[in-house]
Amino acid sequence: MRIISIGCPVPSPHVDNHSIANAPSIFDYDACIIDTQAVSEQIEGIAGMTLDAKSPDGRAISTGESGAYHFGLGELLEARQLELRQLLERGGLLIVFAYANVRHPSVASFPGLHRYSLIPSPEGEPFKWPTLRPADGKDLRPVIPQHAASGYLDDLAGRLRYRAILDLNASHDGTVLGRSVGGAAIAAEFRVGAGRIVLLPPPDALAATQRKVFTSALLECIERLLQEPDVAEAPVWVRRYDTPESATVRDDLAAAEDGLKQAQRRVQEARSLLADATRFQGMLWQSQNAAFREVIEDAFRLLGYSVSSSSEAMEIRDGSKSVLVEIASSNNAVSDRLYLTLQQRIEEHFLRRKSRPQGIIVANGFRGTDPRIRRDPFPQTLINACETYGFALIPSEALFELVTFAAEASDEPDVLQDIRQSIAETAGVLEIAPEDEADDEVEDAPEEQTSVGADNGAVVGAPDPA
């Protein structure tokens, strides 16, 4: 059993370790291990003239054409491409450590070169975007216990880190060997000619003492793959010789596979519906990121505002009235400097457009705590500043209650207008009262009063969340 490793150190007397530049002919081996990230780095190093590399015959690798004293990089890579194809055509094994694909435009002598150009492509080109996408994680599991790769995935649990995931569909003739805990495909096997390509997650940063365990698990995997008989599919005409028992079992299998596909489709549809139905819950717990901003923007749209989503800083409009919005979500109390940022934006807006917009702050303090038991999610200085400058300070749980109420009254524009008006009249914290409390307060108020206001903040009626 002859094995060559390109770019991945595998300390063993059974393995010849080389770089993509100085390796001998790859097709003379039974199996090849290739680390695509290491190969990419060497290609870029040679192309950028920051890495001195030599070919197997000792000539320097250069970016130009080959000559008497140097070997052209483009010609070298084309040769490696052919060698790997010949390895697979003669029934060899190619182990590929998977990373997301990248282009190498710096190698002008090899137009269109990318990270997987050297790897013979299986049917459907699964190594290209969007089938092979960047990812990062350590929690993974084998899905075919009897496959040789399962030992590699099991033995090195905690020492592997997947850097890419595969999105295989019907056009890709591949077998998924391992998945992340979230169900993403992170290891797979493909047939190319008489040979096999096995895509595996690479090892994480290994200490010297861990390299021995990695080498043992990898070589055992390769040995099993090379020794196992090639399992070819029987030709279609063999089914003419089905016995009654095999025909029944074949029909049962087809029915079970069809049922599985339908169940997976229903699960996917249900997950999509659930994600849509619960998207506004994200404002109660998500960190301050793009997803948090998107759910806040959706909330204001539901309340009847138009949202300017192209700007980095959020701006919403209620008819002709412009409103600038600052958002914050924190594990602790939100910063009291939010009002300073909002005030500065309002002044800049006034200088540009000669109109002074309203201001809103949406704050989600102590996001990891149930909103019902949060204590002081924003400092008193922020409350005082909002009352002084006339900003509406909306706790995320209050905005959630408004959105829940607005979803039920989406066909009642007057109700949505009342909510927006209450927000516009708020200077300080916007509080939400259960519907029965708000009704009682309205009955006690003068007839001309349509919303219940405090000296600074405002109380808006909404359904009792209980």
Image (cartoon, grey):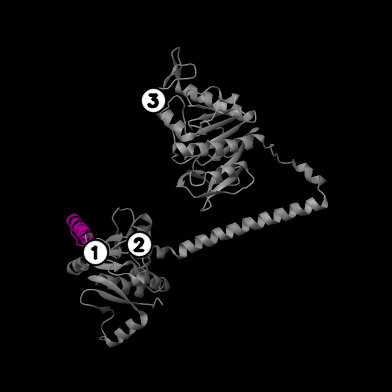
Q: Nearer the viewer, residue 196 or 282?
A: 196
Q: Nearer the viewer, residue 269 or 146?
A: 146
Q: Nearer the viewer, residue 318 or 156?
A: 156
Q: Residue at x 26, y 85 (%)?
A: 445
**Is label 1 or label 3 in front?**
3
Q: Where 17 sits versus 126, above or below?
A: above
> Whole-Å distance between the Cαs marked 3 and 2?
49 Å
Residue 128 in the magenta stretch? The answer is no
Looking at the rendering, the stretch of residues picked out in magenta corresponds to: 338-359
Q: Quadrant of residue 355?
A: bottom left
Please indicate, yes or no, whether residue 122 appears anywhere in the rendered image.
no
Q: Where does the C terminus fall, quadrant-wise?
A: bottom left
> Whole-Å distance between the Cαs marked 2 and 1?
15 Å
x, y percentage for residue 203?
Answer: 48, 40
Q: Nearer the viewer, residue 303 or 100?
A: 100
Amino acid tagged 2: Ile
Amino acid tagged 3: Leu
Q: Residue furthest front?
A: 209
Residue 348 in the magenta stretch? The answer is yes
Give the label on residue 296, or none.
Answer: 2
Q: Quadrant of residue 119?
A: top right
Give the label on residue 51, or none.
Answer: 3
Which residue position holds label 1? 359
